[in-house]
Amino acid sequence: MVTGASSGIGAEFARRLARDGYALILVARRREQLEHLAGELGGAEILTGDLTSDEDLARVEARIAASPDLDLLVNNAGFGTRGRFWEAPLEGQERMHRLHVMATMRLTRAALAVMVPRGGGGIINVSSVAGFGQSPGNISYCATKTWMNSFTEGLDLELRGARSPVRVQALCPGFTITEFHEAMGASREGIPAWLWMRAADVVDASLRGLQQGRVFVVPGAIYKLVVFLEKLTPRALRSAAVIGAARRANRSKTA
Ligand SMILES: NC(=O)c1ccc[n+]([C@@H]2O[C@H](COP(=O)([O-])OP(=O)(O)OC[C@H]3O[C@@H](n4cnc5c(N)ncnc54)[C@H](OP(=O)(O)O)[C@@H]3O)[C@@H](O)[C@H]2O)c1
């Protein structure tokens, strides 16, 4: 099952998993895009639903409960917003927490309820490099992706502690060419070309990492370096750099 399969990284997961011979369940809100993808893949089950809605989420949970042989769940559906926390509409912040946190938590629980007793399966939570730090103007996004990282790491510890072979992964991509930036009304201009990754390469790294049992997968050498440096840099220094950058951006906007 792949959530957010109607575009971007989710659609790429679906293409790659279909090539690998999986029977797919595709989840997202836009039926037309899902039907188009299912046609391209030579068939797939389609579940349309808004994962921020309790009712739709319950339908997806029920579908998982009815799939005792579920091999893989990819919690990929997600979106970004822009603006300072106290200025951005609350509705978008709430929806983001429902999608990145509540939907991930509930679908993961439903999947583990079939995978753990069976003794097999895997869950990939599509997080972000943004989950390793904070970025003004984007703080709910960073916070929810940090939650995903922590949740996945904790689950891995529980599963290994229980000697379960079920594997979990937090996939943490950097800038990836998808509909993500367009959907949040942001431009891709100004971000250097060498920072952009292809969704297919992100998916490749993730599935390789799953085979190797890696809990955190950061695709691309440049982002591995960014995460490494972020971990090495003292928090006070990181905060000073981020505040300085936010103030400079603010000055150039008002100038
Ligand atoms: N692109 C990047 O630079 C980047 C970097 C790091 C992490 N990520 C993460 O990668 C994941 C996939 O994003 P993407 O880059 O592939 O962007 P995308 O092309 O915009 O895809 C987002 C997917 O999520 C689905 N979705 C959004 N809201 C939903 C909802 N309420 N219920 C059900 N499905 C919903 C969308 O489908 P519908 O609109 O049809 O519902 C779409 O299929 C996200 O979790 C994102 O945070 C992206």
Image (cartoon, helix red, strand yellow):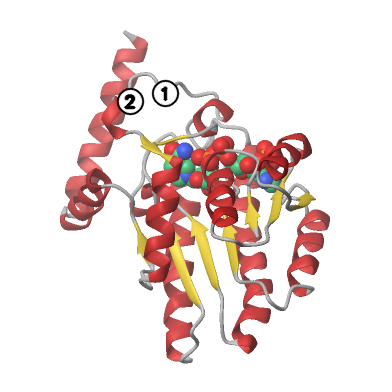
Where the N terminus falls, by quadrant?
bottom right
SS type, badge 2: loop
* Residue at image point 57% right, 48% down: 15
- Measured as percent of width and height from the top left, residue 9 is found at 52, 44
Q: Which residue is mark 1?
A: 188
Q: Label 2 amino acid?
A: Ile
Q: Is residue 87 above or below residue 14?
A: above
* Residue at image point 53% right, 71% down: 122
SS type, badge 1: loop
Asked whether residue 237 is in view, the answer is yes
Q: Is residue 18 left or right of residue 167?
A: right
Pointers 2 and 1 in contact (C-beta within 8 Å) = yes
Q: Quadrant of residue 19?
A: bottom right
| Ligand 1 - quadrant of the structure image | top right
Q: Is residue 155 above or below residue 218?
A: below
Label drawn at residue 191: 2
- Measured as percent of width and height from the top left, residue 246 is found at 31, 29
* Residue at image point 76% right, 40% down: 35
Q: Is residue 10 above or below residue 171?
A: above
Q: Is residue 199 above or below residue 84?
A: below
